Amino acid sequence: MSNRIDFFQSTQTRLALPAAVTSTLLDGSLCPFLELVEIVRCGWPEFSWAKLAVNQAAYPDASLTDEEIETRLGIGKSIRVRRRFNGSPPGVAVHSFPVFEGHIEVVETRLGSDGITIEVLAKDFSANLKRITVYGQRVGDSDGSTLHLSGTDTVFNPDGKANATAESIESNGKSYKLFAVEPSAGKLWSYAEVIDYLLCEYFSDGQLQIPGIEQLRTLTDNQVVRDLDVTGLNLIDALYRCCERIGLEFKFVPRPEPTGPGQAIVFYKSGQGRVVELNCQPSGEQLSISKTDIVRLHSRKNFWPVTHRYIGQGDFKVYEATFELVKAWDTADEDTDYGKFSPSTNPDFYQVKDVYRKWCLNEAGDYSDAPYNQGEAFDFSKIFGSSNFARRRRRFWPALSTDKQGKSLGYFLQVSFDNGLHWWQYLYAFNNLLDECGVWLSSDQLDVNTWVAALKGVLRFRITASVISDERLSCIVADGPVNSTVPVVEQLITVPRQFKYRKVSGQSIFAGCSDETLGTPDEIDDSTMLYEFVRKRAAVASATGETASVRTAYLALDYEVGDKVSASPESRDLLSCRNNNRSTSWIERVQMDFRNQCTNLRIVRQRK
Amino acid sequence: MDRGWLKEALFVGMTSNAFKLGTVLSCGWFWMRVGGCSVLYRGEGMEQIDFANILAVAEVDASEMSPPDYVQHNSGSTYFYVIRRANNCGDQEHTLSAAVKVSIDAGGDLAEPGPNNIFVVGAEQVDGNKIELVWYYCPLEQKQEPACFRIYGDSGTGHIGYENPITAIPYMGRKFYSYQSNSLDADKYLFCIRAEDTGGTESDSVLIKIQLDTESPVAIDILNAECV
């Protein structure tokens, strides 16, 4: 008894293949005088297009003049290419399905010694999107009313702050999320909602079939947008900027259904679609068209394997702390003459303007030496949590702690008249210095308490404010082995506007404070989000290991952009689909050449 | 792949299908056709093939296969036959690639195969009040090559006279064909195009309804605009 199992597969033994049978429809009716030259399917930025040439040989009875043909080939008229097939074998009923759908974008006429040649370039719906500019915001109110503010920038979640409406709002007959009137009451935009907004806002129903919001949510993994600015871009570039951040691609395809829009926008991830086989028999075998698709191949392998180390960098970290300030004046200029230190009573005030008035942090050590002698430069290590900072001049920024209304406490300056035993908020005028961490008391005359304490030598100041550190919020993701023999290429992704870190340090007088007059501090930690962002970027930005150009043996009309490529076990593994299971190959561009009756494919291989 | 024979014989006992496949009971069920076989099925449509009922079994490489005599072929009916192969273990393929359509005419004989129907027809008003019909013929898997296309019309009566074709356009291969009518009055017209082979067998009718307007649309006034 044998345990052999035979599997049957239809084998095509006839070598003669019929030429691809297609028909061209111009504005919905058969167009006899247009001959297909080529059709290209591609993603951004080329998208799909078809080139057709006027050839009256197929329709000699019509005797159309060149002028009549030019009149019929109006710019913008729809062009449809359909493939015919037998719809009910073993009987015969000729059916058709769409191969290309678009409109006339360019008509090129050449008059020369050979006569006149007219060529038509038809493009898919992407050409229409390129003519639409994105600007302004469609603002929706909770009562359902909407308004287009053309002067505002189209920025989704600027600086990571939510600005979408909480619910979908009806506008132009469609329901989608809009920009919130009051951003403080808004929700965060997700990528799915941004795509939905762009498509719904700029199209009326019936022009283009767009995916539902649930489908988009699944495709985008429901990721949340962080500071996406698309102001002034055309709609295609705006969609691309949105999609490229999450590794999503899109294309335009003709719809086979006779009703509804002729084309649909399809969002997809490369290499995750259907699998197509591209086979080539081992040399010496008898040629079988069931087993050989590839007749020509040109591939280019790049240096591989290489580990890419993605270093994601957000904004510089910001810390709030309470800083005790030091005297930033020459003590030799001190005097007991009250009038000498007021600009209104002393015409030479500029000579002593800093005395008793300028209080600094001494972060760069400017006041460590004579004549100031204020000790060592300020040490930020307790605040920043590391000693990885430069001794340089900085400046104070408003505190992160807030009042009951959620507004920052600003530069919270406190004074002590008893050498630091008690502190009071300094309620007189002062300026925050912009070129170093410090303040300058700017009242015309110093108040009596300050003056007396200064003379006694017990005056002290401290300020609660925030300081920007030298370290960015960062994370590192590698797509392969590090510290091995594999070379490592570091790639820097700097996204300061999207990911931030602000913290009230333990050195602040408001840290852990349960004072009811204070609100929630303006702290933020986007570390997790940054890690997710970099991880996803690393997943989609794998370097191309190999690019191959493949020519098929016959004109194949059914290859699509994004199709994953594999090979049968009986085939030669020309595209390394079988012997390399750490990579994925997919089709990036399809060119159907009707003149030479073949299909050219561009295939890329990337690490999984 | 399917091993329907095994289940059927085990749980239902000796059945008609098991008998045709040569399955016998001898201390267990054994697949007897160690060289594989071809199995014939029939249905009234490609979606209605009766795969539960084996009509005939032949060797795997048989080039001919006949349905049994008791299988009826009624006049004016169409039947679809499908052959599937089983391998040396009794696994059967799941394809419809080997199929044949049998049409019986009113006389009980095999219906004469005709040319294909014409593909996508369009009509256009040209040269004043004339109608131009444009169509395409595709010889994709045609059973009979057409000799000409016959055009029928109703002359505005609503009833197409199939006895008297308006004209015949000779077939010249896979290409576009056109027909231009005489000058017509404003009315509703019906046209029919059929492909016909040398034996006179016609394809199915393709009907076109046309509403002919002889009057030009009312011209619109050109608006004038000027700076004020």
Image: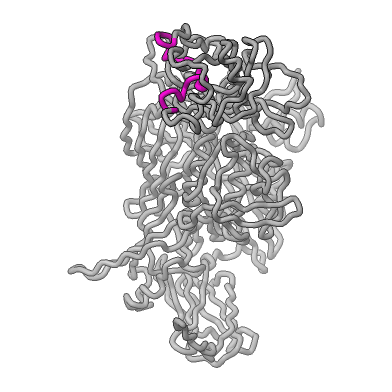
Q: Is residue A32 magenta?
A: no
Q: Is residue B3 visible?
A: yes
The answer to which of A186 and A445 lies nearer the viewer is: A445
Q: Is residue B15 left or right of residue A290?
A: right
Q: Quadrant of residue A74?
A: bottom left
Q: Quadrant of residue A485?
A: top left
Image height of A241 relative to A353, above or below: below
Q: Write the start and end of the magenta stretch as one range.
A: A349-372
Q: Is residue A365 magenta?
A: yes
Main secondary structure type of the part rendered in magenta: loop
Residue at (78%, 31%) from the top-left corner?
A: B14
Residue at (67%, 64%) from the top-left corner?
A: B108
Image height of A467 relative to A297, above or below: above
The answer to which of A494 and A554 lies nearer the viewer is: A494
The answer to which of A530 and A363 lies nearer the viewer is: A363
Q: How many marks?
A: 0
Extreme-right residue of the structure: B12
Q: Residue B178: horizontal and vertical position, in percent?
A: 44, 76
Q: Residue A389: horizontal and vertical position, in percent?
A: 46, 14
